[in-house]
Amino acid sequence: MTDYIVPVAYDTLEERLEAMDRDGFVYFPQLIKKDEIEQLRSHMEALEGIPESFDQDSTRELNTDRYGSNAPFLNKHINNCFNRDPFFLKYLDYPEIIDVWEAMHGSDCHVIAMTSWITGPGRPDQELHADWQPYSLPEEYMQDPRVKMPNYISTFHVYLDDLYEELGPTKVIPGSHKAGRKPKKGEDNWNGQTAKSVMVKSGDATIHRAEIWHRGSANKSNQNRYLLQTACAQRMITQKFPPYLSRFRFNKDILAKATPRQLRMLGNHDRGNFD
Ligand SMILES: [Fe+2]
């Protein structure tokens, strides 16, 4: 028995939606081609942290106090990438991904986060967590096939490395989005299943539901790990781009380069309820 997950790819939208409902995630092998991987890596490297945007950029001074580490490590986590460089606009409505998003979250879905994350050797394990658990329900209800809880938020991960255990793959518990709750502090399994590494290759991508139990794992290698994360949500989930209290401003030059669908993903909606 393997102790990691070899993800299964599905070709049709219907199968992908079934996987999202059943497993809590769906896999897209080799979504990003080699040339684009190199470009994306260099655009991620070129971003510099803006402290008031809650960016964490330890490029110059290694991180020493996050995630319980007392040893320094590189942690470059940059928010709002779509507003920093027009190169990132394409990840708002990437082919195949946008079809799944619109089917799950509605044709008026929008982006709520886009983060570039470069993680160096020394970064410790994350705790098992759900990114967001918007409701609490007994598991027996969640397992009833008649119960279909709305999918409010999901995250598109673009992996830019061939993952191996020491580099720190994302670990997930398939199906745990149906736990009806988030893991308690220190809890390391759901119904006896622990989180297993999802072994992906550079250029592979996944989408996962915000409720799935998962964790980032330690980087015990000697190389940096590259990940672009874009979170999409139902329209009624607030777009919240730091810095807050309306200090965030869209970059007009980048907006001028966005397509109508990318503008909608950025929040350019038709008038609707509550407007
Ligand atoms: Fe997470």
Image: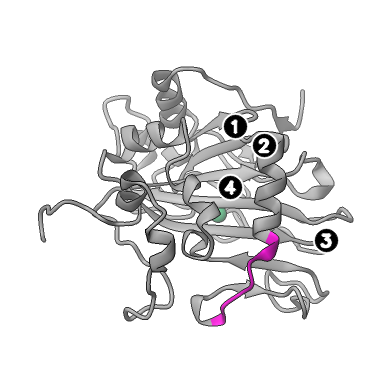
In this view, the mark in front (3 or 2): 2
In this view, the mark in front (1 or 4): 1
In this view, the mark in front (3 or 4): 3
Q: Residues within 10 Å of mark 4 (few under 14, many from 20)?
A: many
Q: Residues within 10 Å of mark 1 (few under 14, many from 20)?
A: some
What numbered label is drawn on residue 203? Answer: 2
Q: Is residue 99 left or right of residue 203?
A: left
Using the image as rendered, state which of residue 207 and residue 203 is in the foreground.
203
- What's the residue type where badge 2 is placed? Gly
What numbered label is drawn on residue 214? Answer: 4
Residue placed under numbered mark 3 in the picture: 121
Q: Earlier in the sequence, mark 3 or mark 2?
A: 3
Task: Examine the structure image and report whether residue 127 is included in the region drawn in magenta.
Answer: no
Q: In which quadrant is the C terminus drawn?
A: bottom left
Viewer can see residue 149: yes
- What's the residue type where badge 1 is placed? Leu
- Residue at 56% across / 30% down in the picture? 27
Q: Secondary structure at mark 1?
A: loop
x and y, in percent, of residue 230 in the image = 49, 51
Q: Is residue 141 left or right of residue 68?
A: left
Q: Earlier in the sequence, mark 2 or mark 4?
A: 2
CA gap, disc 2 to disc 4? 21 Å
Q: Earlier in the sequence, mark 1 or mark 4?
A: 1
Ligand 1, image quadrant it occupies: bottom right
CA gap, disc 3 to disc 4? 20 Å
Q: Are marks 3 and 2 in contact (CB under 8 Å)?
A: no
CA gap, disc 1 to disc 2? 6 Å
